[in-house]
Image: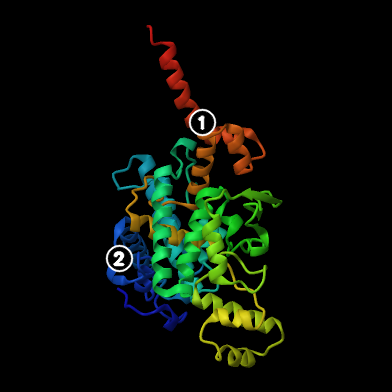
Amino acid sequence: MTDHAHPRVCTVDDPIGRPFEAFLDSKAVTGSGETRSGKYARQLERVVGDWIEQMNNRGVTTFGDLDGQAIAQWTDEYLARRVRARNSGASTPGISAATANVYYDYVSSYLEYCRTWELLDENPAATAVARDPLPDRPSRQASEQQFWSPQERMVITRYVRQRAGEAIDERGADALNEVRDHALIYTIGYSGARGAEILRVPRGDDRRRTGVTWGDIDLDEGTLLVLGKDQDYEQVPLTDKPLPPLRRLREVLNPASDEWPIFTTSHTPTLWSSARDQLSARDHTAAAAEELLESFDQPLQVYRAHDLIPPALTTEGARHLLQKFTEAVGIEVSGDKDYLTLHGARRGVGEQYYREESPAAAQRALRHDDPRTTSEMYAHIEASELSDVGSDIFDGE
């Protein structure tokens, strides 16, 4: 159905399935198509492959044919119809609303990949018209939501620590990506910060969510200033766990200014594109900007030489890393996400505060305005403790 074309050689007139193999390779643990493995990769291949075939059958064959309405038609005639079939008890095989949303997310992930490679001006699956026929994503009880357990946190942090150490021994200062990943996983694993508070959110109306910078962190006090959920700036307690990885990251990255993001992207096309845009904003002509860029081998050299600000890693990029790391260490995760998630890390931090210290400590660490939010999130802990108390109370009966 597809060839193995790298997305950079595709155009809007190419078949929508042409970069599919490159997309699947990008989701592999090592980035090589020869090592695709695991439940997530197999599901992506099946679901997105089926979607490409279904769109072709509808006459939507090229990227130029894709828009929100085309996605909406597929959503209604395939996903929503199968959910209705299941709910009505029809003999036709159906799917749950949760599964429909997961399938939609897979297709959206592929289209976002294509948008990143400039095959699409926007992700048509991210539009309101495309999502309109999609059944509501079922709400989940707090006890069913993902929490990083202490064991899971220990396994994944040990993995990124060893990975960074080996890369440093082998390549020294060139091990920037591994050192960054080490600091990132420790930061989200122990601070309780939201992914959108420390990383770049690629879309949305709030242009301020561009990732935390070195000017936002106090490594002596162990605190990080973030733009909170309510659009107010808040201090996040880092704990002492992420501080050594963050100090090592600062040494290796050697940011040119405090305005540099702590977790810079390693996506080369994004780095070159952003440098080009920033130079153009300084009244460089397109030809002059290109000539300037050609004199550099590595994109970060441009940023240092011309006082530019590199873009931060996106939340989507961090999710991709977590997918790879979860599979690499062999952690089995239940639920609609089969990998350790950014928000699962936050919940795991709060749970540790809740169990080991107090509900009030968990509320402060997670920066919940209303203590009822914390109580609802960890109601399963209270229920379990009450069960133990009740067992003692009724022990004599």
The vertical placement of 369 against 48, above or below, is above
Disc 1: which residue:
379
Q: Nearer the viewer, residue 37 or 336?
A: 37
Amino acid identity at mark 1: Ala
Q: Which residue is mark 2?
A: 36
Compared to 73, does 168 lie above or below?
Answer: below
Q: Is residue 132 visible?
A: no
Residue at 56% in and 58% down = 128
Observer able to see residue 200 = yes
Point 67% across, 79% down: residue:
307
Of the 4 image quadrants, the one containing the C terminus is top left
Q: Amino acid at mark 2?
A: Arg
Determine whether the residue tagged by mark 1 lies in a helix, strand or loop: helix
Q: CA distance from mark 2 to mark 1?
A: 39 Å
Q: Nearer the viewer, residue 43 or 239?
A: 239
348 left or right of 93?
A: right
Tell me where residue 271 sits by quadrant.
bottom right
Crowding near the residue tagged with mark 1, few <14, some 14–19, many ≥20 C-alpha atoms within 10 Å: some
Q: Is residue 23 left or right of residue 257?
A: left
> How many numbered marks have been drawn onto this rendered protein structure?
2
Is the N terminus in the top left, top right, bottom left or bottom right quadrant?
bottom left
